[in-house]
Image (spheres, rainbow, N blue to C red):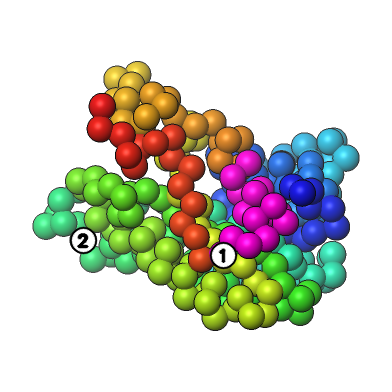
Amino acid sequence: MFALTNKIAIVTGASSGIGRATARLFAEEGAKVIVAARRQAELDALVAEIADADGTAVALAGDVRDEAYAKALVDLAVEKFGGLDIAFNNAGAVGQMGPISDLPLEGWRETLDTNLTSAFLGAKYQVPAMIERGGGSLIFTSTFVGHTVGMPGMTSYAASKAGLIGLTQVLAAEYGPKGVRVNALLPGGTDTPAATFKTPESRAFVEGLHALKRVAMPEEIARSALYLASDASSFTTGAALLADGGVSINRT
């Protein structure tokens, strides 16, 4: 049910954290994976690890804010493997933080471009390729911030990630008749290099926000991405799937 045998997938933000764990898991489940991020060396190392585990992956480095890069990733999937079935648009950034009165316009724009415009550009080229294959699964990494929880100082991050949920819902309605499922995955705090907790004290604070009193490992979020990518979620579309350790409901 969770197998991705003979499926072709793009994973962005694959050089570390959730994206890296998901690319490895998709490959383990049989997918041919195009891994995308800005850092070529990290992508090359990931491709080698996947190959060592008898998986198949190719890398293409670039900036997800660049429309030409979004197109090139899909072109690579088609040319190398014959099409596209799955896209995990996971690349993103917290961006500049602080009170809105101190947030420069360029900081706002950079965060929206990184988190939201990049998803639009990805979907613009991914959806037609999926339709050519008779359907597929499109996944965006959103967050609980701006959806179930407001966190001070995260204006642009919350707005950009909430926008992904609106994008998800519209694309799900628009392309459901053509067999394309579109969902947003909303992780809680996750132990990644980009995590906002930098000290033991800040980590303990973040862990305490969650009902499970811990943060996730990237592999745990990857398994939720696998669910959305696979036939196990064949009747799931337009969803904002919380994989947040209970941070959205916790009050203790």
| Cα gap from disc 1 to disc 2, whole angstroms | 36 Å
Q: Residue at x 21, y 61 (%)?
A: 104
Question: Crowding at label 1, few (<14), some or many (≥20) Cα neighbours within 10 Å?
Answer: many
Q: Is residue 96 visible?
A: no
Q: Is residue 226 visible?
A: yes
Quadrant of res 79: bottom right
Instruction: Identify the mark at residue 174; answer none if there is no mark.
Output: none
Magenta residues, start to end = 223-237
Residue underneath mark 1: 237
Give x and y (percent) for residue 54: 88, 40
Q: Amino acid at mark 2?
A: Pro
Give the camera-side residue of 247 and 45: 247
Give x and y (percent) for residue 129: 71, 76
Q: Secondary structure at mark 2?
A: loop
Residue underneath mark 2: 104
Q: Earlier in the sequence, mark 1 or mark 2?
A: 2
Quadrant of res 81: bottom right
Q: Residue at x 58, y 35 (%)?
A: 220
Give x and y (percent) for residue 249: 32, 39
Left or right, 103 with reference to 239: left
> In which quadrant will I find the C terminus?
top left
Q: Amino acid at mark 1?
A: Thr
